[in-house]
Amino acid sequence: MKRLWIENDDSLLEFLQTPHDGRYAIDTEFHRERTYFPQLALVQLRLGDEIGLIDPLRCNVALIGQLFRDEHVCVLHAGAQDLEILTRVCGRLPSRIHDTQIAAGFLGSTQVSLASLVNEVRKVVLPKSDRLTDWLRRPLTQAQLDYAASDVEHLLEIHDHQISALSALGRQEWVIEACARLVERSHGEPNLDDSWMKVKDARSLRGEARGVARSLARWRERRAMQLDIPVRRVMSDMALVSIAQARPATESQLLGCRGVEGRQFGGEATVEILEAIRTGVDEIFEPGETKRIEVDSKHRGVIPLIVAWVAERARISELDPAFLATRHDIDEYLAGIPEARLRQGWRADLLLSDLDGLVSGSLALSVDDRGRLRLSATSS
């Protein structure tokens, strides 16, 4: 397969005119150790039988966005982070995607790696990657180029294989739906109110300390975005928890908290931190009060039956049970939440009528002579 190193806009525009069949495969290499937002280091794009290795340090990568305007299918693998980056650098996302990892889940696998998928479908062993490779270094080594190209080289053939298998199972629309949801999530803004839950030891805090931790984590996230630096460089987890526990009211008290480094604070940052503390004190909350799904007591007895049937339905459908429904999904369904995942899309196709029957009592579980669960109507 022809491979091109692309390092100027004219070459990129010419490559984007490469004839293809309405599909393209894409992948990215990036770093985010020193920045908040991922730092794009390479874009791999396959069009037809050509692979372009596009240098974003020298090219206007936003030009790739012209592919996204059409109804072409963008094929990628485990593409959540790639979509995040493409949104940022291109200002838009592909109109249609096919994520081969998502599709693999509907074909009986979950969390499958690209290497294992290529080996299974194409009988090819991909070159191994160096996890710590520096993609921003120039020139890239031959090993780096080989690895990068291999990330998109086989995706279109895998797409062909998966579409055929999905069509045979009647699941192609399910994958389209799941991939569309991935695109929708990539457009959304992060929920900064939940950023405190990523802070080590923050969950053990209670009362005012928990409210302050949430307020500080929200401020830290915003400042990291503004400065484009990792959140830990704005304020360490240790400092955040220490401040939340002490709830200082002055700059001197703030600087006395464990983990606080004076060089990180001062001036505007100190004013904002003290304001975040005051805000957090008034934001006392318990996650359990807002996050837990309340299930009516009359439905609690049916939960084990639903869990058992989900596992059996997943086995029959060759799906991972956790991929089909989590306990949170079950709780949302039983609580009658309209947007519950089990009430929508492909999950509803597989499970909703069965679950409604179990809850109403019109259906019951039993065990057949092979030890398998079966669902049958109850006698009136």
Image (tube, grey):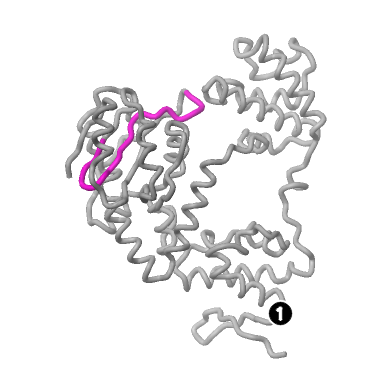
Stretch of the chain drawn in magenta: 35-52
Q: On the rendered image, what quadrant is the N terminus found in?
A: top left
- The residue carrying mark 1 is 361
**Vertically, is 55 above or below 107?**
above
Amino acid at circle 1: Gly
Question: Residue furthest toward the left?
Answer: 2
Q: Horizontal and vertical percent for residue 131?
A: 35, 35
Between residues 178 and 15, which one lies in front from this camera angle? 15
As for residue 183 lying within the magenta part, the answer is: no
Q: Is residue 15 left or right of residue 304?
A: left
Q: Quadrant of residue 264?
A: top right
Between residues 24 and 266, which one lies in front from this camera angle? 24
Question: Residue furthest toward the right?
Answer: 282
**Vertically, is 101 above or below 43?**
below
Q: Quadrant of residue 194?
A: top right
Q: Main secondary structure of the magenta part?
A: strand
Q: On the rendered image, what quadrant is the C terminus found in?
A: bottom right
Question: Residue furthest toward the bottom?
Answer: 379
Q: How many marks?
A: 1
Describe the element under mark 1 as helix, strand or loop: loop
